[in-house]
Amino acid sequence: MDDVGIAPETGWNAQYIDGEWRQQGERATISVNAPATQETVGEVPRGTTDDLNEAFRVAEAAQAEWAETPPQERSRIVSTAAQLLEEHMEEFVHLVAIEGGGVQAKGEFEGGAAVGVASHAAGMALRNRGERSESTVPGKENIVVEEPVGVVGVITPWNFPTVLSMRAVAPALALGNGVVLKPDEHTPVTGGLLLARVFEMAGLPDGVLNVVTGYGEDIGDHFSGHEVPDVISFTGSTEIGRRVATNAVENFNFPALELGGNNAHIVTDDADLELAIEAGAFGSFTHQGQVCISINRHLVHEDVYDDYVAGLAEAAEHIPVGDPLEPESIVGPIINESQFEEMTDYLEETVDAGAVVEAGGDYDFPYVEPTVLSDVRNEMAAACNEHFGPIAPVIPFSSDEEAIELANDTEMGLSGSVHCRDITRARAIAKQVETGMIHINDQPINDDPQAPFGGVKSSGMGRYNDRWIADEYTTTRWISVQHEPREY
Ligand code: NAD
């Protein structure tokens, strides 16, 4: 990966602290293994709690001046970072394939989304968010100001590492905060060091953004409970999210959490079946199903069930599986052996419980064939768990009420979709599905910089994008001015 043109002079085996690429020194390293070949393609320092302490201290020190930097300048730097990523898109797509096992279409999709979210964030710096109001006290003026919170700590996962890091980092910087980012150990480059590099090239002052590469188990608790950050922005599993939130709250760090999903794709009897199937295949098989907002369950009306299953199976059979560096591959490798084991165990358990394999069903590490399962019930393993694989369990229902009940029968509440020609009916269903996001006549994989992204129930707290994240990354203060002597 070091031969990719955008790499810093040190290569990627470095952390980015205080504007310096600090090489591994005495530290151990983390091997970066290509999911497709299992070969080691790079190494990064195994960051320590001392590294984190320094990164937070540096971010805190640099933030004060950054917050005073004119908003036009902050906006320009964030916008330039977005442009630089766009200019290096080909290299980026290559890195996504090697480090994360993402096929070309995934790399392009993710790169475009990261550029989009950073470009949108650049505008946040320019928005005037202050207010003035009258007072009940004679002669008093109330001023409401929105200030950056200070330092934002960001922890992200491996599945869409660049866009998930960028959507947390770019708004934080645009709004005048300092940032410490810890990317996932599987994707330290595309999830962290690459962002440091484009912001460095864009002219971000030293210390404002710092990237510490490390294992969650080594430094995660120290990170989330650290005294410096004011917000901990965490994207990852519900299990770790709960732990992060507990640590954060103990130190009065505000937890912003984007966690797991178990998203339902509801197809009614009047749906345009062809479109519902096309959307269903995209929603289940994109990036091998390793997406928090992918379709975990297809809920299909009994009158169209057989046709839907046949159409989805046909679509699944035609999806090319293979090396992410081959342009024709659509489904690539699974990120690692433990994810592979987990999803194939769910698959086996579901088949043992009576589900029928309609397409795929075979697997050979690191690849799992796009698989369609019929006769599935909500309580079966591949349906009630977030399987995170290219697996499409299809569950029948007989009424809208039953579809809603099935969709809500999970502790998760992230995204979902409803395919239905009657928009009034679709909206009535969408209204009753308990999720933070739901998409009519589409599938659940959507992220739009203008729209709020986040979940309810065990899928998280808080929202990404636009004014929703701006609220989380700023502190609202009331400053009053007594213009005339006050009578007490
Ligand atoms: P994970 O929770 O294991 O890891 C995510 C991050 O947390 C990594 O950077 C990891 O190093 C770090 N971490 C591990 N232990 C930690 C600790 N004790 N303290 C602090 N950080 C720690 O998640 P994963 O399995 O890598 O990712 C998949 C999960 O992420 C799925 O559940 C998926 O749904 C979820 N996800 C959610 C969203 C969303 O926006 N809601 C997006 C992508 C992924």
Image: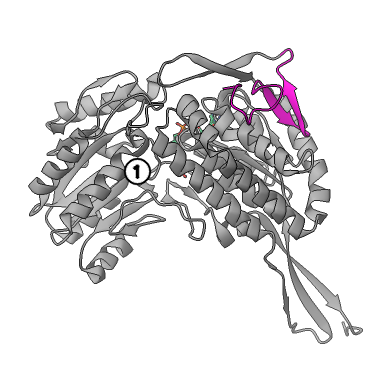
248 above or below 188?
Answer: below
Residues packed near mark 1 inside 10 Å, few (<14), some (14 to 19) or many (20 plus) = many
The quadrant the C terminus occupies is bottom right
Farthest right residue in view:
485
Question: Residue 355 occupies which quadrant of the picture?
Answer: top left
Pick whichever, 26 or 52, lies toward us: 26
Q: Residue at x 27, y 24 (%)?
A: 345
Q: Farthest residue to the bottom: give it.
A: 138
Amino acid under disc 1: Ser
Give the residues in magenta.
1-26
Q: Main secondary structure of the magenta part?
A: loop
Q: Horizontal and vertical percent for residue 255?
A: 59, 46
Residue 466 seen in the figure: yes
Q: Residue 239: image x %, image y %?
A: 46, 35
In which quadrant of the rendered image does the N terminus lie? Answer: top right
Q: Residue at x 49, y 58 (%)?
A: 452
On the image, numbered disc 1 is attached to which residue?
294
User: Is 468 colored magenta in this rendering?
Assistant: no
Left or right: 289 in relation to 39 = left
Residue 25, magenta (yes or no): yes
Q: Nearer the viewer, residue 327 or 402?
A: 327
Q: Is residue 376 visible?
A: no
- Image location (x, y in percent) of residue 25: 74, 14
Residue at position x 31%, y 23% in the image: 367
Which element carries disc 1, helix, strand or loop? Answer: loop
Q: Residue 417: x, y in percent?
A: 30, 54
Residue under the point 25% across and 69% down:
423
